[in-house]
Image (spheres, rainbow, N blue to C red):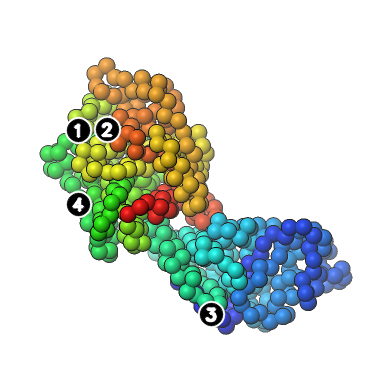
Amino acid sequence: MLSIRLVVDPAVGDTLVLPVRPTEGPVQPADGATQPADGATQPAEGPVHSAGEAAGTLVPTWLDLPAELTAEATALLPYLDQPGAAGAVHRSIRPLLTPTRLLLAGVGDGDEAGWRSAGAGVARAAAHESSITIAMPVDADPAVVRGLAEGLWLASYRFRMAASDDGPAGPPALAEVLLAVADPEPYRAALDTARAVAESTRFARDLTNTPSSRKTPAWFADQVVAAAAGHAGLTVDVREPDRLTAEGFGGILAVGGGSAQEPRLVELSWQPADARTHVVLVGKGITFDTGGISIKPRDAMKLMRKDMGGAAAVIAATVGAAALGLPVRVTALAPLAENMASGSAYRPGDVVRHYGGLTSESTNTDAEGRLVLADALAYAVDRLEPDLLIDLATLTGANSVALGKRTAALYSDNDELADAVLAAAGAAGERAWRMPLPVDYTEYLGSEIADLYSAPTQGAGSVVAALYLREFTGDLRDRWLHLDMSAPSWADGNDGELVKGATGWGVRTLLRWLATQPG
Ligand code: BES
Ligand code: MN
Ligand code: ZN
C-alpha cells in the first residue's frame, strides 16, 4: 500500500497537485493572475471557458507557492474540461521547470465524497510517478483527509499474479504521497481511520479476486486465522466437517458435499472489554458457484469466484473493527463451501435439514447461498445472543436486474436499523437501496414436503431470497438486516475508487455503521 504522510512545508518535488473547485458565478481574474489572451501562443480554439464563464477556482492551500506557479495554474483554469468536477484531473508537463508535473484536481463540493473522487483521480493520473505532493486547503476538515486518503489507497489497489509487470495494469509505481498541511495534528486520526478502512477493503478485494483453485474453504479459513493473529482481541474458531455434522449444519454440508474441497464454518470474534452491544455479521462464502447439478451456463459461471464477497466483507470489517479499536463486540460468521456438480453433490429436490431443525426442499441447487446462510443465521440466533444481526451475500442475479451494477438491495423490518445502514453506506460512498419484504409473498416459500422451498419461481428473486432468510432469524427477526450485494461486489472497469474486479463492497459501509454503535 502506498505511503501517505502529513508534512509541514515540504519542498515542491517532481509532481505537485493543486485542488480546484467549480466556480460559481462569473470568473474574476485572481490577483496577479493573467487570463489567457488571444494571440499566436494560444491554441486555435482559445480557452474552453472564457472569462465570465465557470472555469474553476484554485482552492487556497497551505503550500507557499512561487507567484509564477500560482499564475500559471490560474492561467490553466479556463482550459479545464470539467472545471473543478470531483475526480477530474488535468495534468500538465513542464520540462525544465519545478515541479515537472502540475496536476489540477477537481474536488467538487470540497466535501469528503468530492475529495475521495479527487484521490481516486490523482491515483490514476499519477500512477506512473513515484512521489507526489498534494497541497491541502487552509480550512480543510479532517474528513477531507479521510476522503482523499481512501480515494488514493482504494484506486491504487492492484491484484496481480503475473510474473511480469507488463500488461494493461502496468507496473505499480506511485509509492509516496505527501499531504502539505500547516499542522498535521488535527488530521492524524482521520488518516489512521482511512488507513484501517482501506486496508480492510483491500483485504476483502484480495480474498475475492483470488482464483478458486487456490481459494478453497480451508485456504480462506487459513487467511482469517492469519489476519486475526495480527490483532490482540481477535479470536477465530474454524469448524471442520466432523463438527458441522455433529452440530447439524446440514445446509453447509449439503452444498459443500459435491466438492473435493471440504466446507468450513469460520467464526471470528472481536471482543473489546466492557462492550455492551453485540453485532453478528454473517457473510455468504461460496468459494466457487458452478450452480451444482442445476449447472450454470458458461457466461453466468465465469466470475463465480466472487461468490464469497459477503464472507470477505464481514471478515475484513471485523478485522477493521479491531484495527480501529471500536468499542462494540463483533462476531463474523463465514459459512464456506464450494458448489460443485459431482457424484457426491446434492440434488434438485433433496430436502436439507438446517441447524436448528428447519428443512428446505432444494428445488434448484444453484440457490445454494441461502442454504449455507440459513445454518449460520439459525446458529447465531441460537448461540451468540446478538443484539443486531446483519448478513451480506452475493445472493441473486436479480439484484442487478432491479438496481443495476452499483447498488445493493437492503432488506429489514427495522426502520431505525435500515436508516442507519443506508446513512452509513451513503457516507462511505457505497450505494444501497431499501427493498420491501411483502408479507403475502411468503406463501411462495411453501413446500409440500419441507418447511420451505429454497428457490420459488414466482419472480422478485432478490425479495423472495430475503424472505427465505428471514425465516431463520427467530427472535432476531426485527433486529435483522440483509444486504444482497451481488451487483456491487464486482466492477467491470475502473470507476472512481473502484478498480476493475472485486470492490470489497460492504467493508466501508459496515465500518461506518459499526463506528456509530455504542460500546
Ligand atoms: N451466486 C449466485 C447469484 C449471483 C448471480 C451473484 C450473478 C452474482 C452475480 C446465486 O447463488 C444464484 O445462483 N442465484 C440464483 C437463484 C435462483 C436459482 C433462485 C439466481 O440468481 O439466478
Ligand atoms: Mn448459485
Ligand atoms: Zn451463489
Q: CA distance from mark 2 to mark 3?
A: 56 Å
Q: Is disc 1 in contact with disc 2, using a CB cutoff of under 8 Å?
A: yes
Figure label count: 4
Secondary structure beneath dot 3 equals strand
Residue shown at 55%/77% (left/top)? 182
Quadrant of image for the C terminus: bottom left
Q: Which residue is mark 3?
A: 8
Q: Is mark 3 within 8 Å of ligand 1?
A: no
| Residue drawn where x is 41% and y is 59% of the image | 197
Looking at the rendered structure, the secondary structure element under dot 1 is loop
Closer to the chain start, of discs 1 and 2, is: 1
Foreground mark, 4 or 2?
A: 2
Q: Name the residue located 22 percent from the left edge and 44 percent from the top edge.
A: 384
Query: What residue sits right under mark 1 in the picture?
Result: 356
Left/right of residue 96 with respect to residue 134 in the rendered view: right
Q: Image quadrant for the N terminus?
A: bottom left
Provide the residue designation for mark 2.
Answer: 474
Label 2 SS: helix
Q: Is residue 130 visible?
A: no
| Mark number displayed over residue 237 | 4
Check contact, mark 4 vs mark 2: CB within 8 A.
no
Q: CA distance from mark 4 to mark 2?
A: 24 Å
| Three-letter residue code for mark 3 | Val
Residue pictured at 57% horizontal, 67% vertical: 140
